[in-house]
Amino acid sequence: SFRQRSIRSVLQELSALRELYGVDYVRICDDVFGIQRRWTEEFLDALIARRWGLRFECLSRADLLRPELLPRLKEAGLRRVFLGVESGSQAMLDLMNRGITLSQVERASAALRAHGIDQYWFLMLGYPGETLGDLDATVRLFRRFAPEEYSVSVAVPLPGTRFEKLVDEGAGGRGR
């Protein structure tokens, strides 16, 4: 379970940022922004009603992005979504335990593009077991959807994690 701030609390903070510092663009750093549909809809309604002209960006997941909410998100000020795409290979996404499918990534990306919302993709290279074919699949996906911005990280196992164990075991037979 998780705790979610009240809409009133978030709006008070945004109002203070606007009034005290002239902030007109914010990043919502909530890894699962939008997962609570009712909260999200009420928040969007409140932002739209205030007519602040506030623009924002948020983190999301391809499997949580709801295309039907994108028009309201855009009206409320959404300009960019950060997506953890990681790889264009379903085998790699599965090995990483991402819990998403390439078709979800494709649907989310196409929906964002259709609504004029920029995309920032997080990609990861060098995961144990990644092949040249997996890298090629990532490049093809990237070229097909052409996100406006992206970052590429090299996979680094942290001590005591499942990832470290995967490296030590040779990536489930896919090699190092």
Image: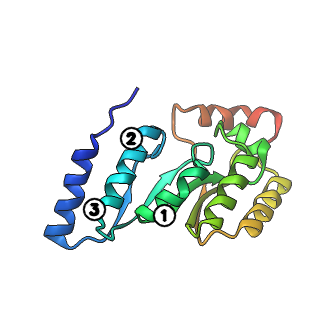
- Secondary structure beneath dot 1 equals helix
- N-terminal-most mark, 3 or 1: 3
- Label 2 is placed on what type of residue? Trp
- Label 1 is placed on what type of residue? Lys
Left or right, residue 57 beside residue 90: left
Q: Residues within 10 Å of mark 3 (few under 14, many from 20)?
A: few
- Image coordinates of residue 104 in percent, x first then y, are 70, 47
- Image coordinates of residue 78 in percent, x first then y, are 45, 63
Choose between 168 and 39: the one closer to the eye.
39
Q: Residue at x 53, y 52 (%)?
A: 69
Which residue occupies the extreme front position in the image?
49
- Image coordinates of residue 175 in percent, x first then y, are 80, 41
Q: CA distance from mark 2 to mark 1?
A: 17 Å
* Residue at the spot of label 2: 39
Q: CA distance from mark 3 to mark 1?
A: 15 Å
> In front: mark 3 or mark 2?
3
Quadrant the C terminus occupies:
top right
- N-terminal-most mark, 2 or 1: 2
Q: Residue at x 64, y 68 (%)?
A: 147
Left or right, residue 23 beside residue 55: left
Q: Residue at x 65, y 54 (%)?
A: 108
* Residue at the spot of label 1: 74
* Residue at the spot of label 3: 50
Choose between 156 and 149: the one closer to the eye.
149
- N-terminal-most mark, 3 or 2: 2
